[in-house]
């Protein structure tokens, strides 16, 4: 996967070992730490996190990209759980605190989604967020993901279970045989 560039001036590129300090800073926040599969609290753990993203890319099951502007890592966007039998994938994203609310995540998700549809050949992309996370919902909607429903008590952090709102997006071309491009765009863009 080549580097992707967005109209907003972002670059989506592979994670590098030199990004370990940025990964450590990102996972230092309590919100990020609790969502991590395991702790990322030192350089070795950050390098392992980066290596896992490369392993998934090599295996063809996931494609995670650092979201960068002018050399600064602002976040991560990924399509994982890639299933070529059903042509589906799972989108995830995060940004560093300074980039939140600036449109970085939505721009990165749109760019990666286009790549996943056009180059990876996927037909359906899904994502989910805790129902108490309106910022993540806003990213999903701005990136063209339609709400599909609530998955009750899907996630558990500590002893607390959270409902998850599921979103999905299909490529524009998937509905053109039934709708005009304008009608299709209206349905896919909130």
Image: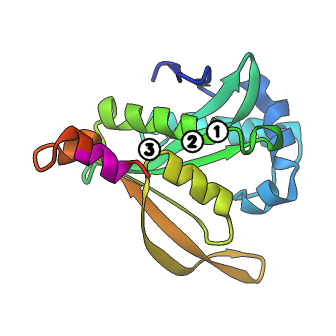
CA gap, disc 2 and disc 1:
5 Å
The foreground one among 103 and 167 is 103
- Numbered badge on residue 60: none
Dot 3 or dot 1: first in sequence order is 3
- Numbered badge on residue 106: 2
Determine whether the residue tagged by mark 1 lies in a helix, strand or loop: loop
Where residue 40 sits in the image (x, y, percent)? 81, 48
CA gap, disc 3 and disc 1:
27 Å
Q: Quadrant of residue 8?
A: top right
Please say if 15 is above or below 76: above
Determine whether the residue tagged by mark 3 lies in a helix, strand or loop: loop
Instruction: Bin the neighbour count of mark 2 within 10 Å (Cα to Cα): few under 14, some 14-19, many 20 and up.
Output: many
Of labels 3 and 1, the one closer to you: 1
Q: Which residue in the rendered view is the most extreme toward the left?
A: 177
Residue at image location 67% in from the left, 56% down from the top = 135
Residue at image location 58% in from the left, 59% down from the top = 137
Question: In the figure, is residue 45 to the left or right of 187?
Answer: right
Determine which residue is flagged by label 3.
Answer: 61
CA gap, disc 2 and disc 3:
22 Å
The range drawn in magenta is 183-188
Magenta highlight: main SS: helix
């Amino acid at each position: 996967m080549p580097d992707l560039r967005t109209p907003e001036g972002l670059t989506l590129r592979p994670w590098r070992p030199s990004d370990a300090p940025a990964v450590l800073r990102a996972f230092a926040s309590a919100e990020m730490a609790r969502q991590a599969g395991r702790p990322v609290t030192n350089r070795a753990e950050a390098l392992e996190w980066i290596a896992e993203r490369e392993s998934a890319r090599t295996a063809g099951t996931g494609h995670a990209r650092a979201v960068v502007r002018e050399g600064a890592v602002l976040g991560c966007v990924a399509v994982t759980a890639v299933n070529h039998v059903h042509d589906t994938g799972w989108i995830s994203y995060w940004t560093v605190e300074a980039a939140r609310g600036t449109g970085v995540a939505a721009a990165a998700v749109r760019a990666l989604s286009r790549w996943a549809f056009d180059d990876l050949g996927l037909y359906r992309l899904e994502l989910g967020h805790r129902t108490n996370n309106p910022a993540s919902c806003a990213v999903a909607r701005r990136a063209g993901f339609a709400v599909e429903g609530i998955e009750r008590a899907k996630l558990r952090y500590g002893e607390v279970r959270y409902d998850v709102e599921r979103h999905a997006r299909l490529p524009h071309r998937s509905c053109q045989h039934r709708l005009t491009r304008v009608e299709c765009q209206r349905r896919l863009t909130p």
